[in-house]
Image (cartoon, helix red, strand yellow):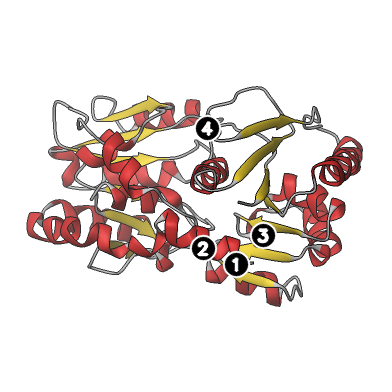
Amino acid sequence: MKKIALVIADLELGGGQRVAINLAQALAKQHDVSLIVFKQEAIHYQPSGKLIYLDCPEKNSLIGKVYNVFKRAFKLRQLFKKERYDAIYSFMETANFPVAMASREAVVSVHCNPLKLLSFFEKILVKLTYHRAKGVIAVSHQVAQILKEDFALKKVSCIYNPVDLNEIKQQSQPLYQHTKPYIVALGRFNEVKRFDLLITAYANSKAQRQADLLIIGDGERRAALEQQIKALNISDKVHLMGVQMNPYPYLAGAKFLVLSSRTEAFPMVLVEALATQCPVIATDCPTGPREIIRQGKNGLLVENQNQIALTTAIDQLYFDPELQAQMRTQAIASIQHLSSDMIIKKWLAL
């Protein structure tokens, strides 16, 4: 049994948080796991093992952010010295920076495309701090390549995010019942996810005559999306479902899922959809989707940010039930290598 610390800024609803929770649950089966967070509010996930709160919530100003990095690093260094963990893993930049400063034995993990999503200040911190870590984990091979080539990091490995196939199967039942066949999308309502592109693509499709579009999530662009839906006169067909703590029944009951992001790292929504045997369509954005989707086998990749291509793919898959059935049959086998047991071994081998 190892004593393991996982560090993440918060447990709000999000992909990185979901990965940390999945990893904690898998590790806690055989190890002593502590989950360390900086912010206690808005906890959407129930962690396995101990929960340690360091009381270092985020700051908005640049000076406050810089101060917070050093404050968090100081508190983490004290905690690590006291607890003497056998392994320390951190998730996303808000935790990675102070963890790398606090311990040279830590492993930091990158869950975004650092070229596309990090600020100038954050990119500098990556170069200044990540080389101190014992290792850097990228969640896709494309992200690993960026870290090596653009940030000159050497100790970089790729480990895909884990998925608990059995848990998702159990939580996906009973299927969500809708009045019509439906297509589903899921994510935070921000500019990166490009739900506006998806809504336009759907509105221009022939599939919209027969199937509704259900979008699960919430965020700062909700009002803009509602206005767009109204302007396109499809308010009776596009439904903003809000945040759902268990989205799996919606995925399992859908004709397919569509991801319209302009950039990702390793989109877990694609993996989780496939775990429910739901086919997927995704923009071939940097980075991640092309490392999940097997073209024509478990889903379709379309040119990034090409609305016409996305509309074409929606109609192609919707009106080809035989292709849908084939994709459902191959879905789980295509992500079997991402099962928690397989991924945990790679983390523990670091």
* 72 left or right, relative to 221: right
Identity, as a three-letter code, of the amino acid under mark 4: Arg
**Cα distance in 3D space between marks 3 and 4:** 23 Å
**Upstream in the sequence, badge 3 or badge 1?**
3
Mark 2: which amino acid?
Lys
Q: Residues within 10 Å of mark 1 (few under 14, many from 20)?
A: few
Q: Which residue is mark 3?
A: 114
Residue 138 position in % (x across, y down):
60, 64
The answer to whether marks 3 and 4 mark residues whose Cβ atoms lie closer than 8 Å is no
Q: Which residue is mark 4?
A: 221
Q: Is residue 217 above or below residue 335?
A: above
**Residue 349's disc number:** 1
- Which sits in the foreground, 73 or 61? 73
Q: Which residue is mark 2?
A: 345
Disc nearest the viewer among 4 and 1: 1
Report crowding for label 4: few under 14, some 14 to 19, many 20 or more residues within 10 A (C-alpha): some
Q: Quadrant of residue 323?
A: bottom left
Amino acid found under the numbered disc labelled 1: Ala
